[in-house]
Image (spheres, rainbow, N blue to C red):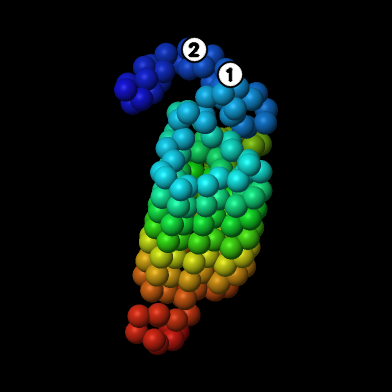
Amino acid sequence: MVDKIHKWLKNNPGIKQKVHYCLVHPYRSRPRWWVRNLLMPFLIKRKKGAYISSTVRRDLFPFNSFEIGYKSIIEDYATLNNGMGAIRIGDHSRIGIGTVILGEITIGNYVSTAQHCMITGLNHNYEALDTPIDLQGCYSDPVVIDDDVMIGANAVILAGVHIGTHSFIGAGSVVTRSIPPYSLVSGNPAKVTFNLKTGQRVK
């Protein structure tokens, strides 16, 4: 049903523009008050025991889904934004204080982020030199974080990255490329320094 609505709106740009105006604040790039407080609470897919702190900024739109799994937690002052794509958080996962999640993002089971991490599936266009970058729009490049991943404080996970299972991302790391499973990662740009499965250092 949702796909049919998307297709219909795509074929009717005038109506699409009016619908967009009703849903999105004209210059703040966030949902209008009625969307955040009256509509989205009924559209969030939340499994039993899931908890979202009352201080979390919920920039959630009805045209992309948001799902949070069994006994997963989103701590205070985090930001959720599914404007660029769906956000899916698995079971027993924890999103730390002040962390920003900007879809399209898929987070597995038993994933934990420490404080003030950034996970973003958004990229900006910038190629047109005669147009301000802010006016060139953006595009989504999904992020996938597999099960059993720990992300240290202030780490940044950039668009298009896939982090393999049972990996540890060190505090302050900037992850610009995909990470294989069982990796210990650190640095800016982040590099794999240790294989947790073999117990060997990676040069």
Q: Can you tell which mark lies on residue 21?
A: 1
Q: Which residue is drawn at 54% across and 55% down?
A: 95
Answer yes or no: is residue 141 visible.
no
Of the two numbered discs 2 and 1 in the rendering, the one whose residue sits closer to the viewer: 1
Looking at the rendered structure, the kind of residue marked 1 is Tyr
In percent of width and height, residue 20 lies at 54, 21
In this rendering, is residue 42 above or below 133? above
Mark 1 falls on what kind of element?
helix
Work out whether mark 2 precedes mark 1 in sequence or the reverse, and give the earlier one.
2
In percent of width and height, residue 171 lies at 60, 70
Residue sticking out furthest to the bottom: 200
In this rendering, is residue 5 above or below 55? above
Q: Quadrant of residue 38?
A: top right
Q: Which residue is drawn at 43% across and 70% down?
A: 167
Q: Quadrant of residue 58?
A: top right
Q: Can you tell which mark lies on residue 128?
A: none
In percent of width and height, residue 157 lies at 52, 58
Q: Residue at x 42, y 45 (%)?
A: 48
In this rendering, is residue 78 above or below 43? below
Quadrant where the C terminus is found in the figure: bottom left
Circle 1 packing at 10 Å, graded few (<14), some (14-19), many (20+), is few
In depth, the one of 186 and 135 nearer the eye is 186
Name the residue tied to disc 2. Answer: 14
Answer yes or no: is residue 83 visible.
yes
In depth, the one of 173 and 99 nearer the eye is 99
Looking at the rendered structure, the kind of residue marked 2 is Gly
Quadrant where the N terminus is found in the figure: top left
In this rendering, is residue 166 above or below 7? below
Question: Whole-Å distance between the Cαs marked 2 and 1?
Answer: 11 Å
Residue sticking out furthest to the front: 49
Q: Which residue is drawn at 52% across and 31% down?
A: 41
